[in-house]
Amino acid sequence: MSAFDLIAGVLLIASALAAVTLRNAVHAGLALVGNFLVLAAVYFALEAQFLGWIQIIVYAGAVMVLFLFVIMLLFDARADLGPDPLPWMRPVGAALAAAFFLLLAYAFSALGPEHPLAVIKLAGGLPGQLGQLLYGPWLYAALLIAVLLFAATVAAVVLVQPGVRGARQKPQAAERDRELEEVDR
Amino acid sequence: MLLLLILLLPLLGFVFLGLFGKRLREPLPGVVASALTGASFLLVVALSLGGGATWEIKDWLPGIPFSLVLDPLSSYMGLVVTGIGFLIHVYAIGYMHGDEGFSRFFAYLNLFIAMMMTLVLAGSYPVMFIGWEGVGLASFLLIGFWYTEKKNADSARKAFIVNRIGDLGFLLGMALLYSLFGTLSIGELREAIETSTVLPLALGTAGLLLFVGAVGKSAQVPLMVWLPDAMAGPTPVSALIHAATMVTAGVYLIARSSFLYANLQDVSYAIAVVGLLTAAYGALSALGQWDIKKIVAYSTISQLGYMFLAVGVGAYWIALFHVMTHAFYKALLFMASGSVIHALGGEQDVRKMGGLKKYLPRTHLHGLAGALSLAGFPLLAGFWSKDAIITATLAYPFGGTGFYLVGLAVAFLTAVYAMRWYVLVFLGEYKGSGQPHEAPPVMTVPNDVLALGAVFAGFLALPEPFWNLIEPYLAPALAHVEVHHMSLGLEWGLIALSAVVALAGLYLGYLAFTRWALPKWYLAFQTWSENAFYVDRVYNALIVTPLKELALALALFDGFLDTAYTALAGVSGWLGDRLGRLQTGYVRAYGALMVLGLVAVLVWGVLR
Amino acid sequence: MSYYLLLSALLFAIGLYGVLTRRSAILVFMSIELMLNAANLAFVAFARNSGSLEGQAMALVVIALAAAEVAVGLGIIVAVFRARSSTSVDDLAELRG
């Protein structure tokens, strides 16, 4: 295990923990961005260069930006306020997550030895080889993704049309509105 | 087909009157019912003159046909049932006048006639059993006719339940016969038994079981307790069902099965003993009764005992002869009592009667005729038939002198209590407070016919050397029994002795109940007799109360079971409620549950 | 390689914890994205191990999928927010038994 592996591992875990625990949504989002960027570096190390670039451009650059936009749009930065109606969820969730991790670890321990020609075959994960795979055997997958993206675009536009009139407010929402107003003052 | 009409017509009467009777005005339901019964009578006459008839549905039950047969025996019984039934129907039009259940009464009466004719005309035991149960049902409905009074409903139930015990015997007997011979058709069974080599023990058991059925239906000891209570029903019911017809069904059953009993010496002996015991019990209990109808009821028990004595010794035709004469004079006695009750506006206690001779002259004549015939006054119908029975105990194969002597003694007692009945009701001074008035013609005319029968019917079967019309008529349908014929002199000597005994009893009764002051020992005996020797109390203590306790205990246990089951059901409800709480509505909780499930699946998958 | 696989399992578990614990819908969504990336890491690690490019192709598909999903998902969150003025997951508790 090289130094790179170690540092990358630490950074990934730290940023992930930050993303799931920080109260401020914007801070959590930024932590997640960091996580994605480190992940991209890891991809580069694992002979998946094209994928690494895509990770940076799409995930860190588009998806997370979209997240941050929506957080700001909805004034949702201080999202996790107020008393937790399910306090028992913390320990239970932690236990379940730990159980899951152990199971996956056990399952992954059956990994076979590394293929001796792996690096050569991967050819660095560059578009040339990857493209031949994508437009060859995986053509249908690629086409379906195109359809999917189209559907998603239409759906996103439709969903945010105004038109829900007279929606009632929940008491917690009204309370939170008041809280926010107070903070603003 | 005409044969089927005999029982279909009254059945139709039952249905029609049951459904529409309420809309008909008096006396139309009574007229309809009487007409249908009369039509049945005429059909029996016509078909008998035509030489009999049969009617059958093959394979009604698997292997058992539904067959009706009009042979000498069933035509004889059928004539008695429909003839006397018709007279009583007419009488009841007058007796039940003004009762709000008028049409219901006649519907039930017609049902009874239909069922009784099913019993009589049956060509196979299951058909007879249908009629058997049917008359039990009709009896229940009619005893409890005025059901709003608890006593009447209780009496009806008592009759039905006690009958049921006998019915069990009948069923078991039928089952045994079927398993032995594979058929329940009476004709086939007769051939089979007369030529069979079946173990006598099995045959004897079957005979005994059928006899148990007869004991229940015909109120023999020990199942006689229902008959006195059955007097709670209207008087026409007592006359028809509990004197003339239903209670003789047991005698009819044994006569029908004579081919079975003729070869069973021990069973026949037992039958005769039971009959004798019943005769004695009935006579002794009649002496102490104060209700005009109960006296006649215990007398019926006693006379039924005589009939069973006759079949027990093997004299089947004589028992049937007594059935006929008894039907005449007992129905007459009941209907005369009914006229008296009707005249006094409902009074039934003889201590409040007396001196009715001058107020009710026609009814007085009827009562006198009935009482004398019952007592065995020479030359009357009852004299010939009762004497035939008593003499038969010496002449017939299963008899004996013991039977003769006790039978004669009971005949003496019969005369005494018959005279007592007559004296207390009609002679002396009127001790009551009502306004006695004679019954209307619709009630007295049928009684006139019955009185004629009570006086003259005995002349149908006279001892040697005179004519006997009944014995040869019935002979083809009954089993042949070896009779030890006595010399003419002995026979007529015994007849004379019976006459003397009867006259002595009548005279003693007259003296005892009009002139003498009764001695202390007799008064003590009278209390015992009045309570029918406390048989009801004994039964209650030994049987009824323990069964009631058992029923209560079981009901309690049943309550526990119910609680247990409800609790069990409650558990599933509780479980459902608990599980329902899982659905809190919180998405996160659902998510956690999903992950939990996923973990479980993975564990199973990984560990495999 | 097993190191990266373990890492991916750990990241996945952390994301799972976040999904169950966070109350704001957007933060839940972010945890889901974390889980998806953990899966991607596993794919790439396998590809590196076996020398087959199929793993990387799959990871590409997943990224595209995630992008589409984020678009629609955030649209839903915005629509719900407009109706309920709240992004708390716990406020949508009507589907109860």
Image (spheres, coloured by chain):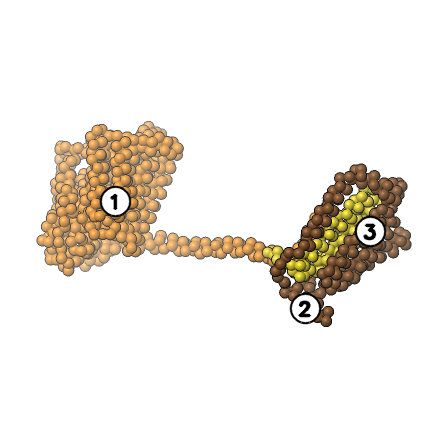
Residue depicted at x 18% and y 46%: B91
Q: In this view, does B568 lie to the left or right of A146?
A: left
Instruction: State the image coordinates of residue B504 (x, y, percent, origin top left).
Output: 13, 47
Circle on res. A57? 3
Per the model, the C-alpha gap separating discs 3 and 1 is: 106 Å
Nearer to us in this view, C11 or B215:
C11
Where is mark 2, residue-wise?
A178
Circle 2: residue type: Arg
Chain for numbered disc 3: A
Chain for numbered disc 2: A
- Ranked by sequence position, the earlier of labels 2 and 3 is 3
Where is mark 1, residue-wise?
B109
Which residue is at the far front? A162
The answer to whether the residue labelled 3 contacts the one labelled 1, judged by CB atoms less than 8 Å apart, is no
Q: Is residue B322 left or right of residue B125?
A: left
Q: In this view, does A52 lie to the left or right of B455?
A: right
Instruction: State the image coordinates of residue B102 (x, y, percent, origin top left).
Output: 24, 49
Residue depicted at x 32% and y 39%: B129
Tint of chain C: yellow
Circle 3: residue type: Ile
Location of the N terminus of chain B (image quadrant):
top left
Instruction: State the image coordinates of residue A52 (x, y, percent, origin top left).
Output: 84, 49
Tint of chain B: orange
